[in-house]
Image (tube, grey):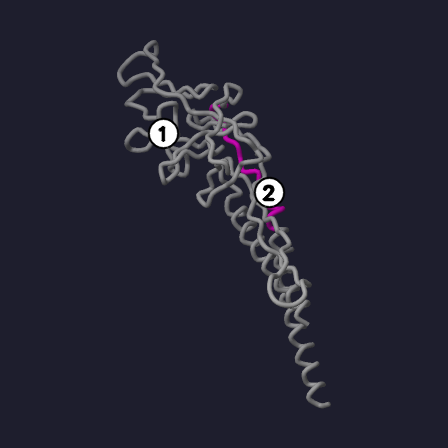
Amino acid sequence: MDKMLYVGMAGAKAAQMAQTITANNLANASTPGFRGDFNTVLSQQVQGAGLATRVNSVSGGSSSNLAQGAIQSTGNPLDVAINGDGYMAVQAADGSEAYTRRGDLRLNSTGLLVNGSGQPVLGDGGPVTVPAHDSMSIGSDGTVSIVPAGQSASTMTVVGRIRLVTLDNSQISKGADGLLRQRDGKPGQDSANVTLSSGSLESSNVSPVDAMVSMMSLSREYDMQVKMMSTAKTVSEGGSSVMQLQ
């Protein structure tokens, strides 16, 4: 009965990991620029004494769906949507460079340009800082321009440019902070072909309906695997009782 138990255990573990990822997708269905994740499972032979007849399902880690979300107009000049296959460079909590498509930008209390998660947006020379101004705009090439406080529109000045890059899709990995990086550790490549649409936001590419259906399906699958393990125990106990009678 151990083989039956292994099958049930491996299936339940895979279903539980998939549920965790799907729950995170569902929680971020309204997060701008969010990329949904999915779980990958690999087969791995169980090592140990005896015949090599047992195979476990092990997590191959999560991967991201890189499909673009819908572009929605907001009218907010600080909202930007990335056109095409590109990313915006931001500063992660550890100070390293990472990438995102989240474009709900704002200025914090010190004039630092940050996204909705509070991560500083990087320019050519580090985080983009915006001095006091009367108006501000973001160009399609990522340039951040302002009319300095108390001056006329003719004095519009460029104060920075958002770094727009492309990544190697085969190397993209999402961290626990939700930011993207390349597994080989290389930085993204600056690209003039990546542009921004001001006054718009890219929505998450997660479908709430699909995620809910997936959650229900995974829940039923988990219950089925647990019942299989319970059945294996019952059969094993029944076999032991028969042997004792003999």
Q: Is residue 14 above or below residue 34?
A: below
SS of the residue at dot 2? loop
What is the C-alpha distance between the residues marked 2 and 1? 30 Å
Mark toward the start of the polypeptide (2 vs 1): 1
109 sits to left or right of 63: left
Which amino acid, by three-letter code, is at mark 2?
A: Ser
Q: Which mark is residue 207?
A: 2
Quadrant in the picture for the C terminus: bottom right
The amino acid type found where label 1 is placed reads Leu
Q: Residue furthest left?
A: 150
The front one of 201 and 54 is 54
Q: Is residue 240 magenta?
A: no
Task: Tell me the mark number nearer the camera, choosing from 2 and 1.
Answer: 1
Instruction: Find numbered disc 1 in the image and state the secondary structure of the residue it sits on.
Output: strand
Farthest top residue?
154
Q: Which residue is mark 1?
A: 113
* Residue 14, image quadrant: bottom right
Residue stretch rendered in magenta on the structure: 197-212
Residue found at the very far bottom of the displayed protein: 245
